[in-house]
Amino acid sequence: MIRNLARDVQAFTSNVFLVTGDTTALIDAGANFDLVSRVDDHVDDLDRLYLTHTHPDHVENVAAVRDAFDVETWGYDPESEYVDNAIDDGETVPVGDDDYEALFTPGHAPDHLCLYAASTGVCFAGDLVFANGSFGRTDLAGGDRPTLVESIGSLREAVSENLTALHVGHGPSVLERPLDDVELAYRAAQMG
């Protein structure tokens, strides 16, 4: 099961997805709210905390989650203080009951990853793309528009026609025709 634990948070935060199953995991940690109590409402323990990237709105709660659940973090950049274990492009990682492929997708951030399970068509896209064809900003440190366009194109190729759910870093998840939103984001990003 996939739950967005930040869904009703009014403060500035990323979405935080709790995925239960064989490997109970969080996707991102969010910021500016008590994530630990929200996790406690659903599970007793966490196996992993995955980071799509290390912008502050995605990682501020990392220390509290590490302390409360004695859990290690996984992300692209092992040099980051927030990443205990590196995930390489193309590596497979367990999330819930499925295996997800890590897709290195820089442009919004130099350490950005998407996680995609081909078996179920579920993708955690971080801040690469959003609902209705929106895409991650590139005016922050490490951002680069041409690289972002290339990354959206890579995601589009990786998920092909199999995409069933797109869980994004901000705003609503896309559960109906999510590939259309990826296509829109790809075209819109090219126009800038």
Image (cartoon, helix red, strand yellow):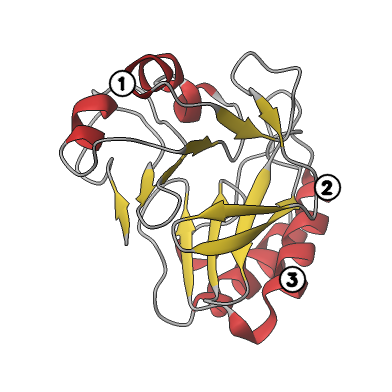
The image position of residue 46, as x and y in percent, is 38, 36
Indicate the secondary structure of the residue bearing disc 1. loop
Q: Is residue 37 left or right of residue 109?
A: left
The image position of residue 109, as x and y in percent, is 70, 34
The quarter holding residue 172 reads bottom left
Against 25, residue 33 (above or below) is above
Q: How many labels does the image show?
A: 3
Against 121, residue 60 (above or below) is above
Which residue in the structure is indicated by mark 3? Answer: 158
Inspect the image, locate mark 2, and give the three-letter code of the amino acid beneath it.
Answer: Thr
Inspect the image, locate mark 1, and give the three-letter code of the amino acid beneath it.
Answer: Asn
Identity of the residue drawn at 23% across and 23% down: 34
Q: Report the front residue among 134 and 41.
A: 41
Are there few (<14), some (14-19), or many (20+) residues within 10 Å of tag 2?
A: some
The quarter holding residue 50 reads top right
Q: Report the front residue among 33 and 11.
A: 33
Identity of the residue drawn at 37% across and 31% down: 13
Q: Report the front residue among 53 and 136.
A: 53
Give me the C-alpha separation between circle 3 and circle 2.
16 Å
Which residue in the structure is indicated by mark 1? Answer: 32
Indicate the secondary structure of the residue bearing disc 2. helix
